[in-house]
Image: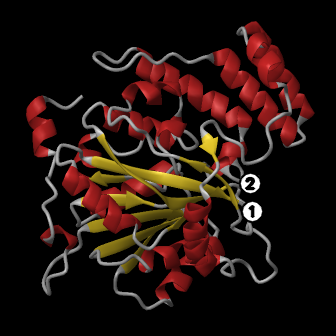
Amino acid sequence: MPSDSERRSAEPRATSGHHLGRGVNAGPVVTVIIPTHNRRALLLRALKSVLAQVDVAMEVVVVDDGGTDGTGAAVRQLGSDRVQVIRHEQARGVSSARNAGIRIARAPWLAFLDDDDLWAPDKLLTQLRTLDEQADARWSCVGAVHVDRGLQILGYNAPPADRDVTEALTYGSSAVPGGGSGVMIATALARALGGFDEHLSILADWDFYLRASLHSPVAAASRPLTAYYIHPDSMYHDPVGIVTELAYMDGKHRGVTGGPHFPVNWGAWLVGCCRMAYRLGDRRTAGRLLLRAIREGGLAHLAKTGISRLRPGDRPGITQLADDTRDDVAGWLGEYAGAMLADGSVQRVPGRSSQW
């Protein structure tokens, strides 16, 4: 854990107005990092939403993590001098890909975007202004809408009301909306944290945000500025992988001196993963996880929620948007509704063996 002096040196302060980088010779203010693996069409859609950001000087780093679908060539064909591609010849996983972007970032702020998610056009600008208003905060999050393949809104995950999110994060990752796509963080702080834990892929965001919360309050922008794509091929539909990584996180954080208590409710988590396997049609895995859940005291949680009650796309803390806000979000989402594969299908995500 960094010392107080290390923490202070890792915390550049945002300053009003000029930090947006509108000057002729100003460098980038935000480095956007997008890891990707064999999802060229989805990546190009996500990248379109990045290049549509207003009034913020930025650079974009696309990390092609061992892909074979011509992602690099497709990105270079865009002809944008703000975008560079770095490539791993062999897939190393999403955490390693993000860390590669962190290492070469030139801007004082970092923003991460998963290759299947989208941003509102003022997402980065709003976060920078929010950080201006809360000068002691070194990272920021936003609200996130959950969307399906057709970009229909399934629900809304509001950002935290409390700036100190450590306790909330010990119970689950939904305290910070948008998965790996909603956060902006000071580059120096991200480096001081050691970047993303490369032992993790599915829960890497959660672990990173939990560690960031120990060093700084979060500055939350209250609007829904990220669209988080829910589809059955995402890593969050790997119940066995989640259980494996949760055990790693439990061991990692339980014994941290001065860190948070990490109260893993194994019964509830195992029931949730059992339900996930059941929805995916993997009855054998569902049965094994159910037996483990019973041994871990998950019967009460199972009785309360049922094994198959949740619909695909449901998440803890998901609510519905007010009509006017929904209309606003639908407006910017509409810019990307046609940016899928020609046949309207979704590119599949390779299995967990590649950590994607």
Relative vertical location of residue 137 with respect to residue 50 in this rendering, above or below:
above
Q: Horizontal placement of 135 versus 309: left or right?
A: left
Quadrant of the image for the N terminus? top left
Relative vertical location of residue 350 with respect to residue 23 in this rendering, above or below:
above
For image coordinates 70% across by 10% down, the residue present is: 296
**Residue type of the residue flagged with mark 2:** Asp
Distance between the Cα atoms at labels 1 and 2? 6 Å
Give the labeled residue for mark 2: 233
Q: On residue 348, which mark appears?
A: 1
Please tell me whether mark 1 sits on a helix, a strand or a loop. Answer: loop
For image coordinates 47% across by 86% down, the residue present is: 76
Res. 42 image quadrant: bottom right
For image coordinates 74% across by 54% down, the residue present is: 233
Residue 291 percent across, percent down from the top left = 83, 15
Residue 126 percent across, percent down from the top left = 34, 63
> Disc 1 vs disc 2: Cβ atoms closer than 8 Å?
yes
The answer to whether residue 66 is seen in the rendering is no
For image coordinates 80% across by 32% down, the residue present is: 275
